[in-house]
Image (cartoon, rainbow, N blue to C red):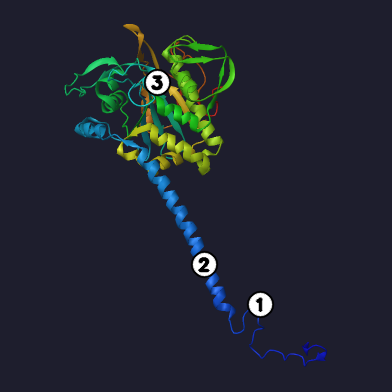
């Protein structure tokens, strides 16, 4: 080093013990440790801000989704009046949820399907049984034209209906959700723990949220009533087309309500399979649109009217393998007094209800007829109610979610 040009200087003395060489560019006498602490404080503040912002956004999303859900308090109040006559839950850890598809024309997006007459029917009603061990889920369709005993129910005008034998979907028109639940419980002996009601608009939004569901058509469809026009072949249905597909009756197959229920089961199975296979439940960017559509679409009881409750239900469904998500229609045949109505096939129907009530296994296999030539019966099992075979798991005509619509 030099003190001045051309004159050698003495070398700098080594630092004393414990001294730290001054960093280049640091002003003399300015310690580095306070600067480091200052930088760390700002970093921690920045990280805290990001965490709080993320938490705030997450809370906003949670509150938004939670606020979408409509709670049905009227049904709960009505059901409390009849608590003594309702069946008790046999297996408390199992859950039975009644899914009701309302054909109401009231509300945004529903008027295009017809004039609002102030009434509604439940053309689609499914009793969903979730086993206590979350090992299976069994969805049983109840035909709209099934002849049942409907109890006395309050009407919207303040009057009451008398107990009567009528087709099942009249219960929803007579007394809404509570009347439908009481009718189902009287028919099956199964305690309904929760219920959900979904309308046309809600169904379309749910399908759109998962980017549609694939179906296969053997023949082209042109159904004016269902607002459906489709070519033959494999295709993905969204929104309006999906709704038309599950509503169509006269233009697909033999035009029966039986085939429509089968088609609804196939479609719902494909929807469940897609949600699980696409990882929707584990991907927040995919999950939010589905949750937003679902929460906007449903009216439910107070036991399922929060996002936490619905998440717990979705988590239970996620734990069930798709091949154990089963769909079937209650065993029935043409009503003896009117071929345009249905009646239960016994003892097959009672056997099904008993298995679900006691949370015992039910197996479904593809097929169209039971040994007596009726739709939805047991598959070759003894039909004598006085000679039960507890060692044999009853088998019914149906399908599972793993099969899909194009199977």
Which of the two labelled residues, at mark 1 and mark 2, occupies the earlier sequence position?
1
Question: Helix or strand or loop: what does disc 2 sit on?
Answer: helix
Residue 25 disc label? 1
- Dot in front, 3 or 2: 2
Write down the residue under mark 2. 42
Closest to the observer, 70 or 304: 70
Q: Residue at x 39, y 34 (%)?
A: 296
Q: Which mark is residue 330?
A: 3
Badge 3 element: loop
> Depth check: 252 or 190 in front?
252
Between residue 377 and residue 384, name the one nearer to us.
Answer: 377
Does any portion of residue 407 appear in the rendered image?
Answer: no
| Distance from Cα at disc 1 to Cα at disc 2 | 22 Å
The earlier-in-sequence mark between 3 and 1 is 1
Residue 288 visible in the picture: yes
Pointer 2 local density, CA inside 10 Å: few below 14, some 14–19, many at least 20: few
Identify the secondary structure beneath mark 1: loop
Identify the mark nearer the N-term, 3 or 2.
Answer: 2
């Amino acid at each position: 080093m030099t003190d001045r040009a051309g004159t050698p200087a003495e070398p700098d003395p080594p630092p004393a013990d414990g001294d730290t060489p001054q960093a280049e560019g640091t002003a003399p006498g300015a310690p580095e440790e306070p600067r480091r602490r200052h930088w760390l404080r700002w970093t921690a503040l920045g990280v805290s801000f990001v965490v709080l912002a993320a938490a705030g956004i997450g809370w906003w999303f949670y509150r938004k989704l939670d606020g979408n859900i409509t709670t049905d308090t009227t049904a709960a109040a009505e059901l409390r009046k009849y608590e003594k006559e309702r069946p008790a839950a046999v297996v408390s850890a199992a859950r039975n949820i009644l899914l009701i598809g309302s054909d109401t024309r009231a509300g945004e997006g529903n008027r295009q399907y017809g004039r609002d007459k102030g009434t509604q029917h439940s053309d689609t009603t499914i009793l969903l049984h979730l086993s206590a061990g979350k090992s299976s889920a069994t969805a049983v369709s109840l035909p709209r034209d099934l002849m049942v005993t409907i109890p006395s129910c309050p009407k919207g005008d303040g009057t009451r209906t008398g107990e009567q034998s009528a087709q099942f979907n009249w219960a929803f028109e007579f007394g809404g959700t509570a009347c439908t639940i009481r009718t189902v419980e009287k028919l099956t002996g199964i305690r309904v723990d929760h219920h959900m009601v979904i309308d046309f608009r809600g169904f379309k939004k749910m399908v759109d949220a998962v980017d549609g569901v694939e179906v296969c058509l053997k023949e082209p469809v042109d159904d004016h009533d269902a607002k459906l026009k489709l070519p033959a072949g494999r295709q993905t249905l969204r929104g309006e087309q999906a709704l038309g597909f599950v509503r169509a009756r006269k233009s697909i197959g033999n035009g029966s309500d039986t085939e429509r229920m089968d088609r609804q089961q196939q479609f719902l199975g494909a929807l469940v399979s897609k949600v699980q296979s696409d990882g929707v439940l584990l991907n927040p960017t995919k999950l939010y649109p589905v949750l937003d559509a679902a929460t906007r679409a449903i009216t439910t009881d107070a036991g399922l009217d929060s996002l936490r409750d619905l998440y717990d239900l979705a988590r239970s469904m996620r734990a069930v393998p798709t091949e154990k998500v089963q769909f079937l229609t209650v065993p029935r045949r043409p009503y003896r007094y009117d071929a345009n109505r249905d009646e239960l096939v016994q003892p097959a129907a009672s056997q099904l209800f008993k298995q679900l009530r006691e949370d015992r296994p039910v197996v479904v296999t593809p097929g169209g007829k039971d040994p007596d030539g009726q739709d939805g019966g047991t598959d070759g099992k003894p039909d004598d109610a006085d000679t039960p075979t507890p060692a044999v798991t009853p088998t019914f005509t149906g399908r599972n979610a793993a099969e899909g619509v194009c199977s």
